[in-house]
Each structure stands twice: as C-alpha cells, then as structure tokens.
Amino acid sequence: MIRYIARCLPLILALTLHAEGPRSHRLYVCGMESKGYVVGAKLPPSGLFLYQPPVWRQLGFNHPTINALTYNPRDPNTLYIAAGNGCIRSTDAGKTWRILTSWQMTEIQDVALDSLNPTQILIALPDGIGYSDDDGRTWTHRDNGLPRKFVQAVKADRTRDRRFVAGTETGIYVSEDSAQHWLPTGAPGSMITAIQQSPAQPALWMATTQQGGLFLSKDNARSFDKAENIPADQALYNVALHPQDANIAAVCGWHLGIRISQDQGKTWQDRTPGLPSNHIWRVAFDPGRKERLWASVHEEAVFYSDDLGLTWTRAGLEGSIVRDFAFVPEARQ
C-alpha cells in the first residue's frame, strides 16, 4: 500500500496543480531571421526569443540552431532547449544558460522531461536517444529497439511516469520503462517530424511525417491510424492540439499551408488564405486565448489569428524561420 501511494503522489500533485485554475503564460520562440542571409556573413538575430507585445526580445547570444524548448512543470523558470551544441538549461527563465551535455551528444532535435518525475530527461539525437535520470548531470544512450537511430521528436506522457513516445525515421515508438526498451506502435517506415499529446484529452496523440501523412491515436499512443483528407505526399512539419478543446487540431507543412480540424481529425479545412505563403514551419494554439492560433510562415514573419485561422495578423520576427513555439506558465508565487 505504501508503495502504491508513493507511486501515485506525482499524479496527485499534477492533478492538484491543474485544479488550481488557469495560469498566464510566457511565449518563447526558437528560430532565426534567415531571409537574405549569405553563408559567411554576420549571423542575423537567431536563437531564443520572448514575446513582450508588441516586440520580441532575444534572450542570450545568437544561436543558429535551437530546435525545441520545454520546461520543468514543477518550476517553470527552469527551461531546457534542444540546440545544435547540446541540451542547454536555464534556471532563471532564460537570463543565463548552461550546457548539460558533452561533445558526444550534439545536434539535439528535441527534449522532454518526465512530467511526473522531471529529473528524468530525454533528448532526441541523430544517433539515438540520450537519457539522464539526475537532471542532466550524467547521460547515457537508451535506444534499444530502434532499428535506425535518427530521432526527430520525443515526448513524455503527461499522465504516466517513465513513459515516453519517440518519432524516428522508421515510425513511432513507445517506451514504458524510462527509455530502456522501445516498441513500435505506428506509422511504420515513415519519417516522423513531430508528435503531440492532447492537453485536453491525454489519450489523443497526433504525429506528422515527412511524406507519409498525419497519424492519430486515441488509445494513448498504443496504436496509430492515418488521418483522412491530409495529403501523404507532402512534408508535414508539425501538429498542434488545442489546450482546452480536444476536438480542435491544426497541422501545417510545406505546400500544405495550414489545415484545421474541429472534429478530432475526421475533416480538415484550409486556413492558409490570408497568409503570404503556404510554406509553414510551425503552428501553435495559445493557452490564454481560446481561438488564437500562431503560425510561422517561411522567411516572412510570425502571424496570429483570433478566429482559428479565418483571418491573420502579422506579429513580427520578419524574415524568420521558427522551429518551435513554447508556452511556459508563469511561476506561482
């Protein structure tokens, strides 16, 4: 009984924090202003940006390859970024940074923390998966069961400790034991570009692919089916699931533009009109505004819509490529 209670404590804590009510968020962007850049020239503004309406404030030094950002759910001032030179952490909301990994683990594609035990960190690597169980002090490879090692995306199951989902160049894999073993669960043979778990309905997952279409799971990533009406011959870059309404999702890609579903992926509507291009890097729903959708248009700017993509407003970062939108809760006092 004592062991059972101890195992349930992290979930009880997570549910308690959720029950305390909505929190305001900080919006971070990982990207660079790349339009017109010539190799060898001075690097344009790049790296991590914080949105302080109506401007974006760059944090830290210029960094050409920051691919993703996540945060410690128990301390939102502690941020982790997946960067070209390693996994980097800040404990003061982005003012100062420290590289956690060595030269043996670079070109990080994604980073995930066990949401119920955030001292466990996983990073997606070109040659497998890196794992730390001591908050980044030491690292090992944990990719047993992955037939090919390139990993583009990794996410932690928000409802279960030690459970992770990875997107590789041969499909989607799940681990139930802190990445010690991986088993295939969907999209076999497809290059996975992004994976998301629904904040509103944890059993719902979606994953995008390079040229295999969009895949959906309604059984907590145990199996995946291909979505209807999403082309399987185009590069899809990411999918966003609405933070409050499990029926709403957005997917984007190169030539695809932006598509919105309001019925858990059964049907999709084109919401690209009003944007200057159908080359879209990222989309994200704003947790503070129910109908606000953010989008990054290739080397144009960041845009937002307050009506789920029916109309769009230009929001800065001109000439940019955005690799991630990250909404981080304000730390509770």
Image (cartoon, rainbow, N blue to C red):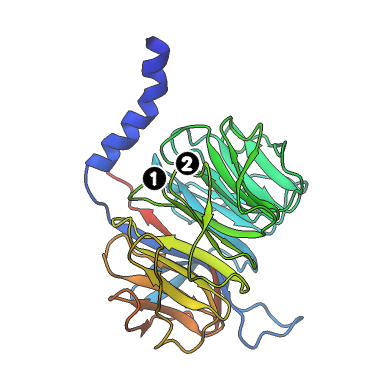
Given this view, does label 2 or label 1 mark the residue nearer the observer? 1
Q: Is residue 18 above or below residue 134?
A: below
Secondary structure beneath disc 1? Answer: loop
Q: Position of residue 21 (x, y in %)?
A: 21, 46
Disc sitting over residue 174 in the figure: none
The one nearer the camera, 256 or 274, is 256
User: In the depicted view, which residue is nearer to us: 280 or 318?
Assistant: 280
Up the image or down, 120 lies above or below 324; here it is: above
**Mark 1 belongs to which amino acid?**
Pro
Query: Which amino acid type corresponds to the residue marked 2 in the rendered image?
Result: Asp
Front-most of residues 10 and 100: 10
Say whether residue 161 is left or right of residue 264: right
In the shown orientation, is residue 108 left or right of residue 231?
right
The residue pinned by badge 2 equals 157
Q: Earlier in the sequence, mark 2 or mark 1?
A: 2
Residue 159 appears in the figure: yes
Q: Residue sitting at 70 percent across and 55 percent down?
A: 189
Q: Residue placed at 69% from the left, 80% from the top?
A: 42
- Please give the label number shown on residue 202: 1
